[in-house]
Amino acid sequence: MSQDILNRVRKVTVEELGVKEEEVVEAASFTEDLGADSLDVVELVMAFEDEFGIEIPDEEVGEIKTVGNAVEYISKKLG
Amino acid sequence: MIEPSGRVVVTGVGAVTPLGTGVDTFWSRILAGENAIAPVTHLDVSDYTTRIAGEVKDFQAEDWMDKKEARRTDRFICFAVGAATMALQDSGIQLTEELRDDFGVLIGSGIGGLTFLGEQHRRQIEGGPGRVSPFLVPYMIPDMASGYVSIVHGLRGPNTCVVTACSTGANAIGDAYHIIKRGDATAMLAGGSEAPINELGMAGFCSARAMTTRNDDPAHASRPFDKERDGFVIAEGSAVLVLEDYEHAKARGAKIYAEIVGYGMSGDAYHITQPHPEGSGAIRAMKMALRNAKLETSQIGYINAHGTSTYYNDKLETAAIKSVFGENVPPVSSTKSMIGHTLGAAGAIEALICILAMRDGKLPPTINYENPDPECDLDYIPNVAREAQAEYSLSNSFGFGGHNVTLLIKRG
């Protein structure tokens, strides 16, 4: 399950941020390592919402700093 | 900052048009009298009263900008980056840190990022405010062409935008000319960019009854000055020029295409979309440009008309030209007959055409000219380009809101 989520998070991140797939490792920070600015982060979060059919409230966006955080957050949401 | 010479020359050119991306392709097709109008392919227009347009078909945004940016940025910004980058490369100018502070950008757009706006509005209706992209505002605002190009090329001089509907491109060049002339910049990227072929743009112009409905015959739909004309054909694209102080250009041995020598503008103060019934605003714009260029009408060798292919524009522009030029009207053509009407980019594309016409001693035609109209009785260079050397060209652009703009350009 979480391997599938990781793959989908990587795919969305590659599309949204225009980065190479091999850069999107679990430890990678979206802003520090993958070059996202504040607008990119909002767009990326929306893309995760679309991809997984979930809602990510603004106050929880702060929990998603790295690729690993995103996988963890999304896994929890999907229960 | 150099001491301004008060003279402003064109040293680089770039274009993204329905007749091709790149100035050489575009120009050879203009001289060949080719038509760019065809059924719309960008979107499903089966419910629209007008279903044809001049679309840009060979432009790949990722050739000119970062792949991620190319994918999500509004098309009008992508076109501007393409045309501006071409113009900069063509100019051969070396961007030193010092020059960057004195190098500005003024690329206007009549409408801005309407495609992006429409998509995001749909997202809001379907999913609520939280679904709207954070890029809606930056990619919708018309000034982002200038802003974006300045970021891509590190140009830190005057940076602004003009929005005057279909006279935008001409105003942008005229205003940039003044910025250099008064010494506030050494060089400017100046022009217009437009990408209006989307649901809202097509629907709005269809409702305004401004476009031709000759859907079954797109190749002959844009027919300025012809008696059977019935509206304009919408199109998209961009043209950007490098304008540069003459002494600066000369000192670096730049190739000088042309010189901007006059700029006139006026307002009709009459109606939001219809031109003044006596063409008085157009007359004042042309006279102002001639006056500030200190030229006589007899010195003008070519007029690139606004020539939209609407009943009123072509009739009233003809009357206005005759009022200014009297008995000796030089050859006039409307290149919108081939390209369609690129709205805020048109004035810049047409200034470029004047520049190339004088460089090569060839005047572009008005195609689809078949049926003379007694109210349009000038020499419109019908259907075939003509060998003739103009020393000065005049280009008209008029916009909704009653804006009238005239540029006067001297051969380089």
Image (tube, grey):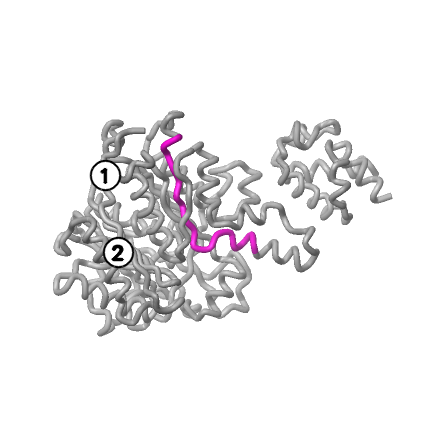
Kindly identify which residue carries mark 2: B304
Residue B102 colored magenta?
Answer: yes
Q: Nearer the viewer, residue B108 or A9?
A: B108
Q: Of label 2 and label 1, which has the lower sequence position?
A: 1
Query: Is B156 situated left or right of A15 in this image?
Result: left
Label 1: state its secondary structure. Answer: loop
**Callout 1 amino acid:** Arg
Q: Nearer the viewer, residue B65 or A40?
A: A40
> Residue B356: x and y, percent?
26, 46
Instruction: Look at the image and give the residue range highlighted in magenta.
Output: B101-117
The reply to whether label 2 and label 1 mark residues of one chain is yes
Residue at the spot x=84%, y=40% of the render? Answer: A76
Crowding at mark 1 (Cα within 10 Å: few <14, some 14-19, many 20+): some
Residue B388 colored magenta?
Answer: no
Residue at the spot x=23%, y=69% of the render? Answer: B376
Kindly identify which residue carries mark 1: B7
Q: Count of labels shown?
A: 2
Judge whether B133 appears above or below A31 on screen.
Answer: below
Residue at the spot x=54%, y=69% of the render? Answer: B47
**Callout 2 amino acid:** Asn
Q: What distance separates the C-alpha of mark 2 from that of mark 1?
A: 23 Å
Q: Chain of mark 2?
A: B
